Amino acid sequence: MKKLLLLTIIALLVLTVFSGCALFIRTGFVEGYIIDATTGSGLPNVTIGVQGERRYSAVSDFLGFFSLEAPIGTQVIIFEFPGYDLEPVTVLVVDGGTTILQDGEILASPALSPGQYRFVLIWGEQPYDLDSHMVTPSAEHIYFGNQTGTGLYLDVDDTSSYGPETITITDVATGTYGYYVHNYSGSPEITTSEAIVKVYDATGLLRTINIPTSGTGLYWNVATLSGLTLTVYNTIEASEPY
Ligand SMILES: [Ca+2]
């Protein structure tokens, strides 16, 4: 009985010391919205954590918003939601501060099967309206005016900043697909848009393409997809590339 009492006291002492240590870990917060790339809506119930730090976690609310406490310094924030591809984000956590992730920075892309591809376009506040365009091997042109084609579709036409605008190829055909972005608003220059295209396949995120910051024209010629090969052009052009 004495032994048990002694063990209990030791256990309590250890607990006190460790919880005392925990108080001295300096932390800050990371906040952001998790967006479903195919709907543009927030994704609730995503589990958010800090890589290598099991004690910190959060869950996104009904708007896809989360606030996660994390130790200070450079941290890799990880996201988990069944059936979705979510890429980790590296952030700098500031002592007592809040690091806010940009709109569209955390995209959840529903997992794809072999032979399926997804092109997700996000951008900054201006120009307000960028448009995703895809020309297929059979010369079908998928864009806001013709959202569904053979084995592919555009889900949402975003006209009010940020995106996402997403084209999913559900059944890839033989031949070459051309993908480009048009500055529908016309101004300011598309090179100031901070646009990013993320390409996904069955393995998850295949490629991230950032828009060039120089060049003149209303069109961003992003890439072609032919068979299993993605060829990135990443040029600004004055006329429709495909
Ligand atoms: Ca648009």
Image (cartoon, helix red, strand yellow):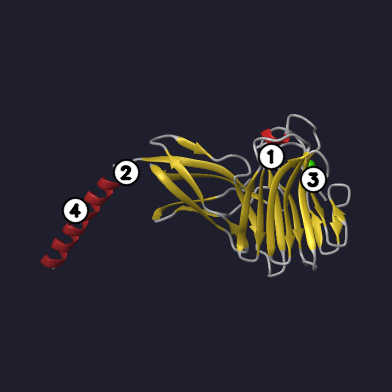
Q: Amino acid at mark 2?
A: Ile
Under 8 Å from ligand 1: the CB of mark 2? no
Of tags 2 and 1, the one toward the viewer is 1
Q: Is label 3's Cβ within 8 Å of ligand 1?
A: yes
The residue lying at 78 percent from left, 53 percent from top is 155
Q: Secondary structure at mark 3?
A: loop
Circles 4 and 1, Cβ within 8 Å, touching? The answer is no
**Which residue corresponds to mark 2?**
25
- Look at the numbered discs 3 and 1 and tell me whether their residues touch, using CB distance below 8 Å: no
Which amino acid is tagged 4?
A: Leu
Residue under label 3: 157
Quote the CA–CA distance across marks 3 and 4: 60 Å
Q: Residue 46: x percent and y percent?
A: 57, 54
Marks 3 and 1 sit apart, C-alpha to C-alpha, by 11 Å
Give me the disc on residue 13: 4
Q: Of 141 and 70, which appears nearest the observer?
A: 141
